[in-house]
Image (cartoon, helix red, strand yellow):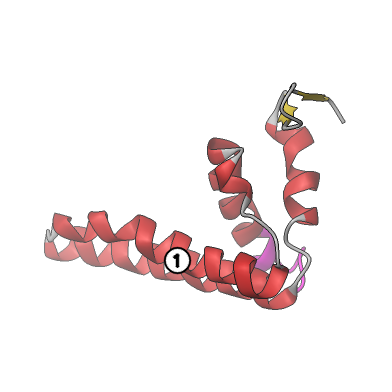
């Protein structure tokens, strides 16, 4: 795994392939993963609704929907800080890769 630690102790990853195993370690609690999955499903539904109705104001709700469910999972069930705070882009990508992996059965629901 290619990673670097900064002076502040933050782990910096050089690519997403190296980040994803870390991401999965931060999502071992089943309830947390389920909340992430539900939040992602609702984001997809909200995007479809916004596009079908041309109600583009719904896009403002996407971060609240997606991150709201995820952060509840982290703070109350996983008992850790979301990776979003330190690795926002990799974390967002990780959410969708984990969503796909749950859909395909690679990760247990």
Left or right of 78, for residue 68? left
Q: Position of residue 83 (x, y in %)?
A: 63, 48
Q: Residue furthest right?
A: 1
Kindly report the secondary structure that dominates the magenta region of the rendered protein.
loop
Q: Quadrant of the C terminus?
A: bottom right
Q: Position of residue 103 (x, y in %)?
A: 63, 67
Who's the residue at 24% across and 67% down the image?
49
Q: Is residue 106 magenta?
A: yes
Please indicate, yes or no, whether residue 23 appears anywhere in the rendered image.
yes
Say which of 15 and 76 sits in front: 76
Q: Which residues are magenta?
A: 101-109
Q: Where 93 sits versus 52, above or below?
A: above
Q: Position of residue 73 (x, y in %)?
A: 60, 70
Q: Is residue 99 magenta?
A: no
Left or right of 39, for residue 78? right
Q: Could you say which quadrant of the image residue 75 lies in? A: bottom right
Q: Could you say which quadrant of the image residue 51 lies in? A: bottom left
Residue of label 1: 68
Q: How many marks?
A: 1
Q: Where 82 sits versus 86, above or below?
A: below
Who's the residue at 74% across and 56% down the image?
26
Q: Residue furthest front?
A: 8
Q: Residues within 10 Å of mark 1 (few under 14, many from 20)?
A: some
Say which of 35 and 106 sits in front: 35
Who's the residue at 84% across and 25% down the image?
2
């Amino acid at each position: 795994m290619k990673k670097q630690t900064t002076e502040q102790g933050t782990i910096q990853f050089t690519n997403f392939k190296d980040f994803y195993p870390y991401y999965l370690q931060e999502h071992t609690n089943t309830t947390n993963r389920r909340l992430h999955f539900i939040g992602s499903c609702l984001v997809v539904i909200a995007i479809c609704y916004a596009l079908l109705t041309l109600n583009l104001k719904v896009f403002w709700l996407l971060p609240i929907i997606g991150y709201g469910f995820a952060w509840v999972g982290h703070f109350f069930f996983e008992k850790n800080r979301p990776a979003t705070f330190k690795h926002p882009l990799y974390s967002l990508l990780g959410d969708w890769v984990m969503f796909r992996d749950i859909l395909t059965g690679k990760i247990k629901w």
